[in-house]
């Protein structure tokens, strides 16, 4: 094994692609998953806007999406991806399926985080004359902020995993590099370097997430 | 101020509806401290939540300030709730906000105040509850009593006419309980805020309330001025609650042990009468002896009281009783000479015609 003729420029390019995919997909996942999670929370049993049918329907759809393995989701979604982003390749082509794959997961985490907010706080807010929107945005979400940040951290790590997988269908990034050079060309050292970078990356995300969570924890 | 008319509340249960409240009629006057007492499961928390419509009644009408509010929704409901502050057993403070932020919260909700106005109001409120120096702390840095003071300041932020206190002191130690009750009385005095106090402790009612309603199994079984309900409880549930407030649990086995041969009477001295040396003087004047079998002395809010169950004997017992009565003492005479009951079990209500009905 030799590390002398590594294509460092390729590795850096792949790393920046991975960063772009994780960053882009993460922000869109939060943007889509947060409202979905709030909706799940509100319509859930014994919650503020309890709507058993709406909750059941939404829950069912999200479960279906979550039960499809991501690698299959990538392939199934290809025609839709082309319609939405114009291509199924590269960063642009992979962010859409990444968001579809992780938003339901994130929505569930949001639902759980919000449910953990003490009901007494919601009751107090209502007793003070807050509207439901005020209760959600000024009381429930701020109270759940540490849990929500933890949910974002977990989702980011799942996204790192998924971007590596999307390399298999031409998504680019470190996963793509590892498969093309490491697997198809038997350059194990490139694969090794990619894996080490991914490990460091995940550790950094987790550490950053933990710091944010503890910074905002007031309990 | 608040009237509950024929209120009924059912909750859906696994085997049909469960009735939490059944035919509640109550009237709470402006400016008073009204106690609602009952043991756990009596429906007190449900009852207080009906007043600001956190719970909707299944039947009946809630009237606040002469206006039926039961059907209120949306903005009118939110406006109503702003006029009714609420204090909770577990404080229910926003942990993500500072003390300042918690008290500012209801003011922010109205959208009517600017930042400077809110800051000024919050400062006044925190000064009132004695937390001026803690404005920038988070709830977790406070003691239970301080948290409840924040809860009270927050409830007062929108200048409500009514303060609902749901077991506001039940999570606090006795000393803190005293200071929180003192604060509530001060608020009632200074701001004229009507206070509805939910509790399971008769002692809190005795110290704080003007009037009280006793709730048992979803019904009001007794209500009236605390001086009346506390000193002359009529219903079994009230009696139980009054006894729980007694140091020895109200078990008066000693009455039986005495085997007193005289006339058993219960004497109640209330207000000015409680300050006078009446009993000894009248006993002397009538050549009577008295043996104290049971007694309690204290204050109901600011009114002193003393209540003794005594056995009167001697030459002129009837004269002594007449003398006590003319001295302003309430005398309840037991029908027989000896109080009959088991000496081991708790004393049951002594229900004999026309005489002393309950010994506490």
Image (cartoon, rainbow, N blue to C red):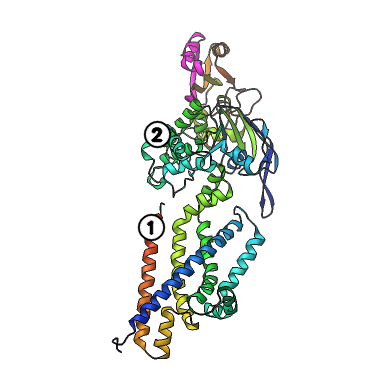
Q: Which image quarter is the C terminus of chain B in?
A: top right
Mark 2 chain: B
Task: Quickly name the residue at label 1.
Answer: A214
Relative image position of residue B78 (x, y in whole percent): 60, 41
Q: Please tell me which residue is depicted at 57% across the width and 18% down the height of the picture.
A: B331
Residue stretch rendered in magenta on the structure: B271-299
A200 sits to left or right of A79: left
Q: What chain does mark 1 sit on?
A: A
Mark 1 Cα shell of 10 Å, populated few (<14), some (14-19), many (≥20): few
> Is A185 drawn above or below residue B75 in the view shown?
below
For residue B130, which numbered disc appears in the image? 2
The residue furthest top is: B285
Spot occupied by residue B119 in the image (x, y as percentages of width and height): 43, 38
Q: Check whether the beta carbons of the residues at disc 2 and disc 1 lie within 8 A of each other.
A: no
Residue B275, position as x, y percentages in the image: 46, 16
- 10 Å neighbourhood of mark 2: few (<14), some, or many (≥20)? some
């Amino acid at each position: 094994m030799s590390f002398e003729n590594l294509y460092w420029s390729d590795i850096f390019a792949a790393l920046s692609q991975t960063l772009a995919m994780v960053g882009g997909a993460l922000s869109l996942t939060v943007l889509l998953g947060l409202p979905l999670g709030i909706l799940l929370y509100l319509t859930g049993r014994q919650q503020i806007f309890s709507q058993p049918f709406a909750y059941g329907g939404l829950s069912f759809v999200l479960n279906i999406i979550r039960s499809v393995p991501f690698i299959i989701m990538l392939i199934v979604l290809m025609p839709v991806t082309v319609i939405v982003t114009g291509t199924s390749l590269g960063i642009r082509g992979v962010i859409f399926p990444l968001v579809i794959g992780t938003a339901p997961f994130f929505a569930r985490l949001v639902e759980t985080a919000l449910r953990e907010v003490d009901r007494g706080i919601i009751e107090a807010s209502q007793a003070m004359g807050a509207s439901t929107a005020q209760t959600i945005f000024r009381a429930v979400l701020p109270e759940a902020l540490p849990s929500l940040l933890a949910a974002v951290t977990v989702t980011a790590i799942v996204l790192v995993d998924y971007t590596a997988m999307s390399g298999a269908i031409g998504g680019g990034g470190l996963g793509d590099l590892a498969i093309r050079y490491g697997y198809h060309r038997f350059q194990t050292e490139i694969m090794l370097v990619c894996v080490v970078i991914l490990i460091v990356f995940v550790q950094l995300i987790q550490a950053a997430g933990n710091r944010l969570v503890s910074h905002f924890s007031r309990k | 101020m608040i009237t509950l008319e024929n209120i009924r509340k059912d909750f859906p249960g696994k085997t049909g509806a469960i009735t939490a409240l059944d035919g509640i009629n109550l009237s709470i006057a402006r400016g008073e401290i009204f106690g609602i007492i009952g043991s756990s499961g009596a429906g007190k928390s449900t009852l207080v939540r009906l007043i600001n419509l956190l719970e909707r009644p299944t039947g009946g009408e809630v009237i606040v300030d002469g206006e039926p509010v039961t059907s209120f929704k949306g903005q009118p409901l939110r406006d109503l709730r702003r006029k009714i502050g609420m204090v909770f057993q577990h404080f229910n403070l926003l942990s993500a906000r500072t003390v300042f932020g918690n008290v500012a919260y209801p003011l922010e909700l109205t959208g009517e105040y600017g930042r400077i106005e809110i800051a000024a109001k919050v400062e006044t409120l925190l000064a009132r509850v004695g937390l001026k120096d803690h404005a920038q702390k988070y709830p977790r840095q406070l003691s239970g009593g301080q948290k409840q003071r924040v809860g009270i300041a927050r409830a007062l932020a929108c200048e409500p006419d009514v303060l609902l206190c749901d077991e506001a002191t039940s999570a606090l130690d006795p000393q803190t309980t005293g200071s929180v009750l003192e604060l509530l009385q001060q608020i009632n005095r200074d701001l004229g805020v009507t206070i509805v106090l939910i509790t399971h402790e008769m002692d809190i009612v005795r110290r704080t309330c003007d009037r009280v309603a006793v709730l048992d199994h979803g019904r009001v079984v007794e209500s009236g001025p605390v001086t009346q309900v506390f000193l002359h409880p009529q219903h079994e549930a009230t009696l139980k609650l009054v006894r729980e407030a007694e140091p020895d649990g109200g078990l008066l086995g000693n009455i039986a042990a005495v085997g007193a041969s005289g006339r058993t009477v219960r004497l109640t001295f209330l207000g000015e009468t409680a300050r006078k040396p009446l009993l000894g003087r009248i006993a002397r004047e009538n050549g009577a002896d008295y043996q104290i079998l049971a007694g309690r002395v204290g204050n109901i809010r600011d009114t002193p009281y003393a209540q003794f169950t005594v056995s009167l004997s001697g030459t002129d017992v009837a004269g002594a009783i007449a003398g006590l009565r003319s001295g302003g003492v309430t005398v309840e005479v037991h029908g027989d000479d000896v109080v009959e009951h088991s000496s081991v079990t708790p004393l049951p209500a002594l229900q004999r015609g026309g005489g002393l009905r309950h010994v506490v």
